[in-house]
């Protein structure tokens, strides 16, 4: 009989009182043996009641749960603090805004053994609890919306991928390449996974591994999220000396194209030039919306807005990142660091 490894689940959280009972509850309800599982909840000094909820759940659970402080407030130091305390042979990161399936750990361990990969995970099902959030979730789960990111759109068969959400890693991965880069307020898991692949590691997406992620509830919050993704993606590219996937460049090229054609139309006095990119984009967005709505026709007016928000926000953020880091590393991040820190726990 194969020996069961000790698994450590690290949960960086901050102000997740609305979700922590679901997210931590799903972790504590795993089918994996409780005596082979430990949980590190690393809290960014929550002030909304998250901490008492975690303590209460820890007292009632047969699984060893530790609540650690993260005065730095952002995810990378939180994860690294949990990693320093972890005794597990396998490490899994789980966010406070998601729910993993009851057999998540069990399936991850099986996939690690079967594939020999350094990291495994699955596709996450994005859901929304309001009409706008549901529309955003649909956009984030479509190839047109997120450029075919496999962990968002899913796959019917197992495959090697460039990144993954809520990955399960062999402990020696961190011994080889280190932990999370603590400069990166956003995209720290993407940078880590890119670093892993550059070092010769492999990441496997298995369709048997499931999780649920709760999307943003407004277009304003979605804009802020994807703006930050685009902004910090530039720093990831700088640090790693390469691009993990060409899809990360497309939104910036889209925004640049819009700017160039608008300026050309103004300078040449030809208004039709201004439609060179927006018109085909609107046709593509409407077509994608019809396909993604799948009978939920009430989404049709909202889906093009969701797509445009995803693409413009990421593209503008990326271009800002190019300008911001044009001369190398700067200590400043965005104009409102406290706001970035507050949002940095949600994917």
Image (tube, rainbow, N blue to C red):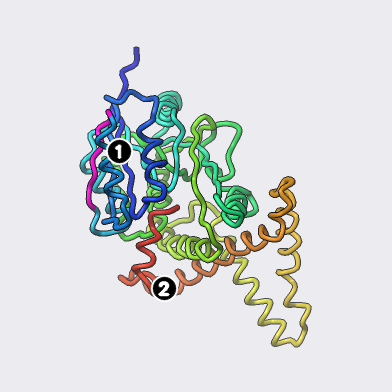
Q: Residue at x 52, y 39 (%)?
A: 123
Report x, y in % for residue 49.
31, 52
- The structure residue drawn at horizontal position 48% and vertical position 65%, both measured from the top left corner, is 224
Secondary structure found at label 1: helix
Image-quadrant location for residue 47: bottom left
**Residue 280 horizontal side relative to residue 112, left or right:** right
Q: Is residue 162 above or below residue 169?
A: below
Q: Is residue 64 magenta?
A: yes
> Quick one: which residue is furthest to the top in this view?
1
Q: Nearer the viewer, mark 2 or mark 1?
A: 1
Q: Is residue 71 left or right of residue 221?
A: left
Q: In the picture, residue 91 is in which quadrant?
A: top left
Magenta extent:
62-69
Measured as percent of width and height from the top left, residue 198 is found at 41, 46
Q: What separation in Å lies between label 2 and label 1 (alpha carbons)?
A: 43 Å
| Residue 283 higher or lower than 39, as above or below | below
The residue positioned 50% from the left and 66% from the top of the image is 318
Instruction: Work out whether residue 55 or residue 295 is closer to the camera in this orientation and state it.
Output: 55
> Looking at the magenta stretch, what is its main secondary structure?
strand
Q: Which residue is mark 2?
A: 324
| Residue 266: x %, y % from top left | 70, 86
Q: Is residue 172 magenta?
A: no
Q: Earlier in the sequence, mark 2 or mark 1?
A: 1
Q: Is residue 186 visible?
A: yes
Q: Is 277 drawn above or below residue 200 in the view shown?
A: below
Residue 23 is left or right of residue 270, and the answer is left
Nearer-the-camera pick, 205 or 62 = 62
In the picture, measured across the screen, residue 148 lies left or right of residue 265, that is left
Q: Position of residue 187 (x, y in %)?
A: 42, 55
Q: Secondary structure at mark 2?
A: helix
Residues packed near mark 2 inside 10 Å, few (<14), some (14 to 19) or many (20 plus): some
Q: Which residue is mark 1?
A: 57
């Amino acid at each position: 009989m194969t020996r069961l490894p000790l698994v450590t689940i690290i949960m960086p959280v901050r102000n997740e009182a609305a979700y922590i009972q679901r997210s931590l509850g799903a972790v504590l309800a795993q089918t994996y043996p409780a005596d082979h599982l430990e949980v590190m909840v690393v809290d960014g000094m929550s002030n909304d009641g998250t901490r008492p909820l975690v303590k209460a759940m820890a007292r009632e659970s047969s699984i060893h749960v530790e609540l650690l402080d993260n005065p730095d407030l952002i995810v990378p130091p939180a994860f690294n603090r949990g990693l320093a305390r972890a005794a597990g042979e396998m490490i899994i990161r789980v966010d406070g805004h998601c729910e993993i399936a009851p057999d998540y750990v069990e399936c991850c361990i099986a996939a690690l053994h079967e594939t020999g990969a350094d990291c495994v995970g699955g596709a996450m099902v994005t859901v929304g609890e309001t009409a706008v959030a549901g529309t955003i979730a649909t956009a984030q789960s479509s190839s047109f919306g997120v450029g075919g990111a496999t962990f968002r759109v899913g796959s019917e068969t197992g495959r090697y991928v460039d990144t993954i959400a809520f990955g399960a890693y062999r402990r020696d991965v961190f011994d080889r390449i280190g932990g999370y880069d603590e400069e990166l307020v956003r995209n720290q898991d993407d940078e880590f996974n890119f670093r892993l692949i550059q070092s010769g590691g492999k990441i496997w997406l298995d369709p048997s591994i499931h999780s649920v992620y709760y999307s943003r509830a407004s277009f304003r919050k979605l804009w802020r999220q994807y703006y930050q993704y685009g902004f910090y993606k530039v720093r990831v590219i700088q640090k790693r000396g390469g691009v993990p996937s060409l899809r990360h460049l497309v939104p910036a090229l889209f925004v640049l194209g819009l700017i160039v054609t608008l300026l050309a139309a103004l300078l040449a006095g030809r208004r039709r030039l201004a439609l060179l990119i927006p018109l085909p984009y609107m046709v593509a967005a409407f077509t994608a919306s019809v396909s993604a709505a799948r009978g939920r026709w009430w989404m049709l007016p909202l889906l093009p807005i969701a797509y445009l928000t995803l693409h413009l926000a990421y593209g503008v953020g990326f271009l800002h990142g190019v300008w911001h880091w044009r001369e190398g590393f700067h200590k400043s991040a965005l104009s409102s660091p406290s706001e970035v820190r507050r949002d940095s726990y949600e994917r």
